Image (cartoon, grey):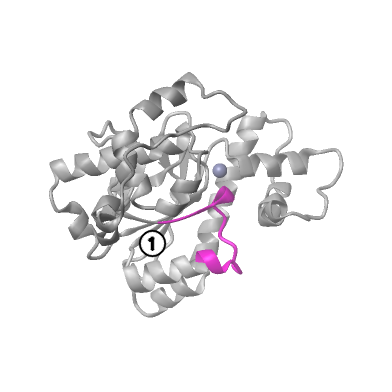
Amino acid sequence: MPSRVAAVAKVIVCSSTNSSSRPGTAVPSRPVATQPQARKLHIPTQITLKSSPQTAAPAAYRAVSLSLSSLLHRSLYISHPRRYHHSTKMDAALAKLFVSNAQWVKAVNTTESGFFEQSAKGQSPKILWLGCSDSRVPESVVTASRPGDIFVHRNIANQVHPDDDSVLSVLTYAVAVVGVEHILVVGHTNCGGAAACYKAVTADTPPPEPTTPLARWLAPLTALAGKLDLKDIPESEALTKIVEASVRAQVENVAATGPVKDAWAGGKKNLWVHGIVYELETGTLRDLGITRGHPAA
Ligand SMILES: [Zn+2]
């Protein structure tokens, strides 16, 4: 693999090897207890977490609640006193996030003193990840990356619409300000967005006019799926075919955006656009080998 793609290769290699970094250690956050205003707040002597009165708290919830008091005094009440004071609907899933965050902050401060102070000074990631919103493809976790390693934009089915200001603003900032060198369009197997398009184009009736935000968002992908030969192949195979075709199309879409074209026209040779598929079944990244770059690179 050429040395110029070392950064993106690192992302792919980290995904397929048994890294010592633990999933969950890559979630960026701020140690709320160190915020100046937190020290001025009154901390209640007792915090009671309840589910809604009409439902009994499940065992798992009660177990989590018992371990929360000291951590929640700091991470919940201190950071959001008014909102927290009036809420009795903190459930186990949300509480677990705050507890895990507090534990993670403590672990990072123990193993790498000064990490957050350094992180707060700025960022210079070499990777921009354009991925799906799917919870099973968290870019920092599957690549064993750390806060500051990857600039990110995710949406349903990792689409790059030419008129989408959200993705265009991310591309602009990532290329012109942050200085990323590798833009990764990352689809994944068993994508729900691709599945919706598959159902739409294989139904007995033609796809209806999109009338919802989700249908409008997926309309270009539905149109693309409608052009593929999906007959006589299993649905799982058809989905992968749609996902790969979509990644190829989004790579071309990225290459055609103003921020990328302007960068190449301005002589920036160290900027590439890659097409990748994440395999949910194995946890590995697969490079489709369709990288686009500066003509002279
Ligand atoms: Zn997806």
| Residue 165 belongs to the span the image colors magenta | yes
**179 shown above or below 244:** below
Q: Label 1: which residue?
A: 272
Q: Residue drawn 44% across and 71% down? A: 172
Give the magenta-colored segment's residue range.
152-167
Q: Is residue 223 left or right of residue 45?
A: right
Quadrant location of residue 178? bottom left
Give, as a three-letter code, the residue at label 1.
Answer: Trp
Q: Is residue 17 left or right of residue 169?
A: left
Q: Quadrant of ligand 1?
A: top right
Q: Residue drawn 58% across and 66% down? A: 164
Question: Which is nearer the eye, 160 or 274?
Answer: 160
Q: Name the spot of residue 75 as percent of width and height, x first.
A: 33, 45
Q: Residue drawn 57% across and 33% down? A: 52
Q: Name the spot of residue 272 as percent of width and height, x first.
A: 38, 62
| Residue 271 belongs to the span the image colors magenta | no
Please indicate, yes or no, whether residue 110 appears anywhere in the rendered image: yes
Quadrant location of residue 125? bottom left
- Ligand 1 closer than 8 Å to the CB at disc 1? no
